Image (cartoon, rainbow, N blue to C red):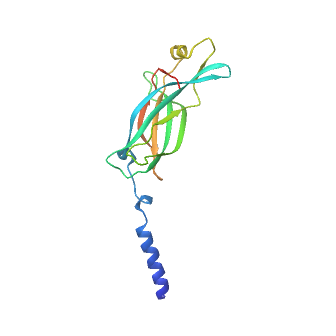
Amino acid sequence: MSGRRFLGASLLLAALAAAPAACNRSVDIKEAIEVVDASSGWYDAGIVEGKNKIVPSVTFRLKRKGGADVAGVALNVVFRHPAPAGANLEEDWDEVFIQRADFRDADQTEPLTVRTEKGYTGDPPQSRLDILKHSQFRDVRARIYAKYSSAQWVEIGSVDVQRQLLVR
């Protein structure tokens, strides 16, 4: 190998070795971040196709634990109906994907509000509060999954959607 090729190869190897470790390091996301300041309810989505509509809504922040070196994560918030008494499996209802939630200058994100497209509707004069009391109304739980880099999705928390009406 000529001296010039050897020098070029050496410089390339040195550059690769000096590249940020973030591209290659593994982060246990469940140990690195947590869900904090969670609140929930049923958002008044207004009148849709002539019917009153409410949709589940959760608001939360993500907090880095112990100054973990994570700049941002992808989130998938899956809304499910809790399993009926005696059953083991929850039923998927809807989900919302957030491409990136950034921590920015602090160890936590700005508040993140997630609402589904699916919801419950009622014919007027049925009020939105009446929808929450209807015999066929089913509660919903939001399961929050995070993904960092090319790692697998990991559940980092869940929020039971409270039977309360949220307005604007």
Name of the residue lying farthest toward the bottom: 2
Camera-side residue: 28 or 162? Answer: 162
Camera-side residue: 89 or 58? Answer: 58
Q: Is residue 7 left or right of residue 51?
A: left
Q: Is residue 100 placed above or below 132 in the rendered structure?
A: below
Q: Position of residue 53 (x, y in %)?
A: 59, 22
Name of the residue lying farthest toward the right: 49
Q: Name the residue located 59 percent from the left edge and 12 percent from the top edge.
A: 126
Q: Name the residue located 49 percent from the left edge and 86 percent from the top edge.
A: 4
Camera-side residue: 109 or 133? Answer: 109
Q: Position of residue 15 (x, y in %)?
A: 44, 71
Q: Is residue 56 placed above or below 151 in the rendered structure?
A: above
| Viewer can see residue 115 | yes
Name of the residue lying farthest toward the left: 66
Q: Position of residue 142 (x, y in %)?
A: 47, 32
Q: Quadrant of residue 85?
A: top left
Count of marks placed on residues: 0
Q: Is residue 101 placed above or below 93 in the rendered structure?
A: below
| Viewer can see residue 160 | no
Q: Quadrant of residue 30?
A: top left
Q: Position of residue 19 (x, y in %)?
A: 43, 66
